[in-house]
Image (tube, rainbow, N blue to C red):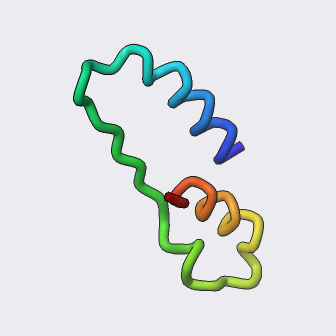
Amino acid sequence: MNVKGLFFTLQKLIPHLSEGASIVLISSGVSVSGYAQMGAYAATELAESWN
């Protein structure tokens, strides 16, 4: 849900942005801190913040 929701929202949003506009994506630090019980959540957070 995290990654798909973000992807589809941006897919619809981008055509409506003005030239030179920016999108700032913010995610939690779970993807880099290593909580074993939050593996699936951490994976989606990393997918959202990967550049």
Please give the name of the residue rendered at 56% of the width and 84% of the height, measured from the top-left corner: 33
Q: Nearer the viewer, residue 36 or 6?
A: 6
In the rendered view, tell whether residue 3 sits above or below residue 20: below
| Position of the N terminus by quadrant | top right
Please give the name of the residue rendered at 55% of the width and 25% of the height, measured from the top-left corner: 11
Please give the name of the residue rendered at 34% of the width and 46% of the height, measured from the top-left corner: 24
Q: Quadrant of residue 36?
A: bottom right
Number of marks in the rendered image: 0
- Picture coordinates of residue 51, whole percent (x, y): 50, 58
Q: Residue furthest left?
A: 20
Q: Nearer the viewer, residue 41 or 8?
A: 8
| Horizontal side of residue 13 vs 21, given as left or right | right
| Horizontal side of residue 49 vs 15, given as left or right | right
- Picture coordinates of residue 2, whole percent (x, y): 65, 47
- Picture coordinates of residue 45, whole percent (x, y): 60, 61
- Picture coordinates of residue 40, whole percent (x, y): 76, 65
In the rendered view, tell whether residue 41 sits above or below residue 9: below
Q: Residue furthest top?
A: 16
